[in-house]
Image: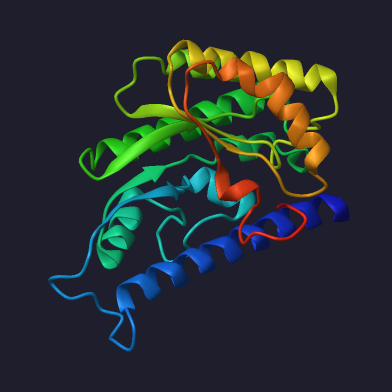
Amino acid sequence: MREDLCDIKRYRIRLAMFCLLLIALLSFHGAGSGRSQAPGPNAPVWRADHHMHLASPELGRLVGECLPSNDPPAVFAADAVRALDQAHVSKGVILPCAYLYGMPSLHLKPHEIAALTRRENEFIAEQVAQFPTRLVGFLSVNPLYDSAIEEIRSWQGSRQFIGLKLHFTASAVDMRNIAERRQLAKVIAVAADETIPIVIHLGGGKFNAADAELFIRDVLPSAGESWVQIAHAGEAGPENAETI
């Protein structure tokens, strides 16, 4: 039980570090050299923040990824738009964290993961729909569960979701397990049937060059003509020598 709690704590610390880095970068961009951090009327406008997260109250209660200032604690679309406005960014890509329900440390059963994943994606779809000119939505799943394929297919043609986010680290993917690589390829192929873009959090932990080669050889080809972005240059936040 202690190891499970440590897994969640480590994930939250890494996510918090990345968020702090992003805030620092946005502040630096708005500040310029030797000027106030408040952007002026002629300040450059970024086209998009390509990696933002929201979190439902349900997810917030389970894993703690939320803004405690909200009532109930969560991260809503209004929070994302407020951050975009403050940084003079036109649009934001919202990547759900529904995959977190599949973290082994939570000990949820497959049917529970499927139901919670659906509710989290529905929450994100409802939130994105409130700001259709500012927010672009993706859906997310834990690819190791059979319910992932059904979840992706259920959103085909959705106006709120135009892409898929996968998080191999939080989903406890073992790239050296051939059965898991085949499952990943199946899930990505379903998304590729719609030719939708796919964002994949690939590295972190013990992931190394050999794992990257297995991904490129056995998994990536299933994406077909779909665009694939490797999030955070392969890491959870700041790059490091091992990841490079």
Q: What is the total number of numbered labels drawn onto the structure image? A: 0
Looking at the image, can residue 191 be seen? yes
Chosen colour scheme: rainbow
Position above or below: 234 against 218: below
In-front residue for pair 7/18: 18
Looking at the image, can residue 145 be seen? no
In-front residue for pair 218/69: 218
Tell me residue 190's x, y (percent): 54, 13
Position above or below: 49 against 105: below
Residue at 66% from the left image edge and 17% from the top image edge: 185
In-front residue for pair 33/20: 33
Tell me residue 89's x, y (percent): 28, 57
Tell me residue 96's x, y (percent): 49, 39
Q: Residue furthest bottom?
A: 34
Rendering quarter of residue 124: top left
In-front residue for pair 195/4: 195
Residue at 85% from the left image edge and 25% from the top image edge: 177
Position above or below: 137 against 49: above
Rendering quarter of residue 16: bottom right
Residue at 63% from the left image edge and 23% from the top image edge: 220
Residue at 57% from the left image edge and 14% from the top image edge: 189
Image-based side of 85 in relation to 181, left or right: left
